Amino acid sequence: MEYRSLGGSGLKASAIGLGTWAVGGGPWWGPTDEAEALRAIQAAIDAGINLIDTAPGYGFGQAEELVGRAIRGRRDEVIIATKCGLIWDDSRGSPFFNLEGREIRRSLRPDTIREELEASLRRLGVDCIDVYQTHWPAIPPEATPIADTMACLLDLQKQGKIRAIGASNVTCAQMDEYRASGRLDVCQPRYSMLDRAIEQDILPYCLQHEVATLVYSPLEQGLLTGRIGMDRTFSPGEYRNQIVWFKPANRRRVLDMLEGWRDLCSAHRCTMGQLVLAWTIAQPGVTVALVGARKSAHAVENAAARNLQLDQATLSRMRRDVEALGQPE
Ligand SMILES: NC(=O)c1ccc[n+]([C@@H]2O[C@H](COP(=O)([O-])OP(=O)(O)OC[C@H]3O[C@@H](n4cnc5c(N)ncnc54)[C@H](OP(=O)(O)O)[C@@H]3O)[C@@H](O)[C@H]2O)c1
């Protein structure tokens, strides 16, 4: 079983990690069956997944609470990655977006980070967060300097409340600023075979500077499993409505491309989702693919993808096909 280093932290994670955004439910994902979501998290751990990514903002604390319940009694088996920087019911920070009648604000001020950390520790039922990540960069009017944020994170690390430090949705220039203050172990960018922008800058940067990448939405929110057909519709508020690849004309092109890989699935005795995930974790600079699941069958299926080795000819063929798709309309 392959475990990969998370920067210089000493932590080693499975190449497939479990994401819990959808577990938080809400209008973007629709309601979550809590009992099934709990089973999914436990099934992922049983299947060898040792990294679970969550955030306070996923269901206003719901996802963290469920993760906390799922890992009770098995804390030592998991690396818990959570985040700070999105707050609600609070006038500090800078406006970001509204959801369910609440205003979500971005804040990387030391005082809000310290409060968020205590709330996450409580919800997760742990005394230390393994990977603590800033969720989104601070923006005006309260653009807290990265050096101030990092000083706070380094102090929390010194106190033993967090282990590794990470930053999500950042540029290379912003990572330079983090690294000017101390060790940055993890970066969490968006990446899938349909959204490869970070191959130009973030992935080479992270390889060069020993920063692990936890890449998110590798299945394009389920589209790349081939199981979301042309007949599936999403309500206006659902997040998948905002993803351009889900538009019918684009979705058709993706499904046709996946259809062309049926022989690869047969040869490897795997599902389409597993094939796509195996391709994703084989890309240079990708440390962990964070795959969202709130059904135990999905969690187990996704976990098995990390044991799938694709040869160079297969990797190249899949890349040629996704490159041939071009940009979405
Ligand atoms: N840092 C950030 O800003 C950020 C942003 C986005 C995501 N993330 C993290 O990355 C994780 C993964 O990203 P994501 O959840 O957006 O997208 P994803 O992993 O590409 O897709 C997850 C969704 O795909 C469907 N799915 C998963 N496995 C499946 C399978 N085997 N068969 C059929 N459908 C399957 C599920 O939909 P249903 O639930 O509808 O069944 C699941 O919720 C998140 O959970 C979160 O932890 C971070």
Image: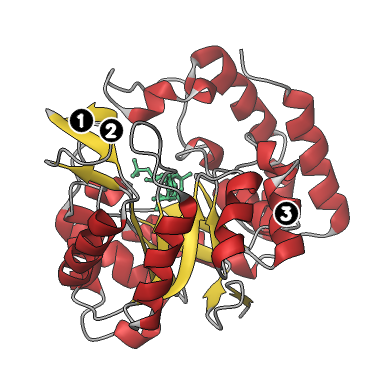
Residue drawn 32% across and 23% down? 234
Say whether mark 1 is within 8 Å of ligand 1: no
Q: Kindly identify the amino acid type of the residue bearing the numbered disc 3.
A: Tyr
Say whether mark 2 is within 8 Å of ligand 1: no
Where is residue 299 drawn, in percent x and y? 40, 60
Instruction: Find the distance from the CA under tag 2 to the CA under tag 1.
Output: 9 Å
Residue placed under numbered mark 3 in the picture: 205
Residue drawn 53% across and 64% down? 16
| Disc with the residue nearer the chain's start (1 vs 3) | 1
With respect to residue 124, does 207 lie above or below? above
Give the label on residue 99, or none: 1
With respect to residue 59, does 131 lie above or below? below
Q: Report the mark closest to the observer, 3 or 2.
A: 3
Q: Report the mark closest to the observer, 1 or 3.
A: 3
Say whether mark 3 is within 8 Å of ligand 1: no
Instruction: Find the distance from the CA under tag 1 to the CA under tag 3.
Output: 34 Å
Where is residue 220 drawn, in percent x and y? 51, 38
